[in-house]
Amino acid sequence: MKTNQNHQNPSLISLFKLFNAPLHLSNLLSLMLFFVFGLCFGIILTFHLKNVSFNLQFTQFSRSNTTTTEAALAAISDLVTVTVPEATLTPEKVGLRSYLTPPEPMHDMTDEELIWRASMAPKVRDYPFERTPKIAFMFLTRGPVVLAPLWEKFFKGNDGLYSIYVHSSDSSANVTVPEDSVFYGRRIPSKDVEWGKVNMIEAERRLLANALLDFSNQRFVLLSEACIPLFNFSTVYTYLINSKHNFVESYDLEGPVGRGRYSPKMAPTVDIEEWRKGSQWFEMDRDLAIEVISDKMYFSVFHDFCDGQCYADEHYLPTFVTKIFGQNNSNRTLTSVDWAKGGPHPTRYTRNDVTVEFLVKLRNDRSCEYNGEKNHICHLFARKFTSHALDRLLRIAPKLMQFNL
């Protein structure tokens, strides 16, 4: 019977023998290593899966946070835009100041642009701003104003009542002017000028146009580097500002240096009977100055036909002014010149000519008419003085002419 039971449970007997068999040391170590390896692998795998889940969650949070931040910034931007004061968004108004402020004398306008701008004149005669009338002193020179130290004394103490413009006939002349001089920075864009040529008139018109850019300039006087003042600034200013007439010398002269310079090609714009002669050294008001720079009809005739021995500077303005604006012209010049010696050029005064008696004579040389009445002051300026006369002029003229008074 026992034998039959053993045959019926062979697997149980084998398992019992296996667990009851002695374990070898190498088998135990293998089992332990396998267990440790499995444990470590499980731990690592668990942490890796948790990290992946965390990164996914962080990325989603970052994207959500960025979207939220952008939305917040957009909202802030909208808020700032709405709350900005309206005044800061309004462009600066364009008023009279920018229009009335004249450009610097050395600008970049062409002659055509300059004359176009300077020819603008308001129809309304009353100025809507406070304005002190000024006199524009325009110097047409070959180079520097050689008698500048005398003019410095003349202008001293009268700021705001005058403007200075210098046109140098030698456009390439390198003239250095001290920064404390009234002539500093007063040179306008200039071009070469030849004596007796039409470009002399172009230079005069260029000076007038630049001076017209300043609305405060009311009277305009043309001078040369050889001119001197015969009276103090106060006398000259009062004389010009209160004058009812312009001072453009004009007369009809028979002979070769008068009507003999006329060209029949100028007809019918200018007939021989309308031909006039006079000094180029003029003085005029603002209305006439605008007409002079705006003229094309008469200037083009002189430009085309007044050449050779015509001397446009002695005939253009006398003819143009007498023909069109003669009723307001005095037909005389304010600049004293001595032609007694004859020839194409007036007398030149040197150092030895400058005396008290000589200057007194220039100041009181004849009687003339001023605003319809007789007047003993006929010339405000005189020429032609050389640079060698400057030292005596500086010693005698300021006291005699009462400069700075």
Image (tube, rainbow, N blue to C red):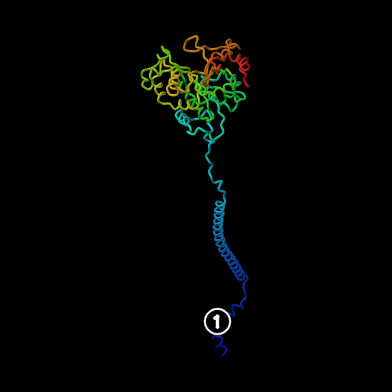
> Residue 402: x and y, percent?
62, 19
Mark 1 secondary-structure assignment: helix
Q: Crowding near pointer 1: few (<14 within 10 Å), some, many (20+)?
A: few
Q: Which residue is mark 1?
A: 11
> Residue 195: x and y, percent?
46, 17
Quarter of the picture containing the C terminus is top right
In the foreground, 116 or 234: 234
The type of residue carrying mark 1 is Ser
Q: Is residue 62 above or below residue 122?
A: below
Q: Residue at x 56, y 31 (%)?
A: 131
> Residue 325: x and y, percent?
45, 24
The picture quadrant where one finds residue 254 is top left
Determine the residue located farthest toward the front in the rendered image.
Answer: 373
* 19 left or right of 372 in image: right
* 275 left or right of 101 in image: left
Determine the residue located farthest toward the top in the rendered image.
Answer: 341
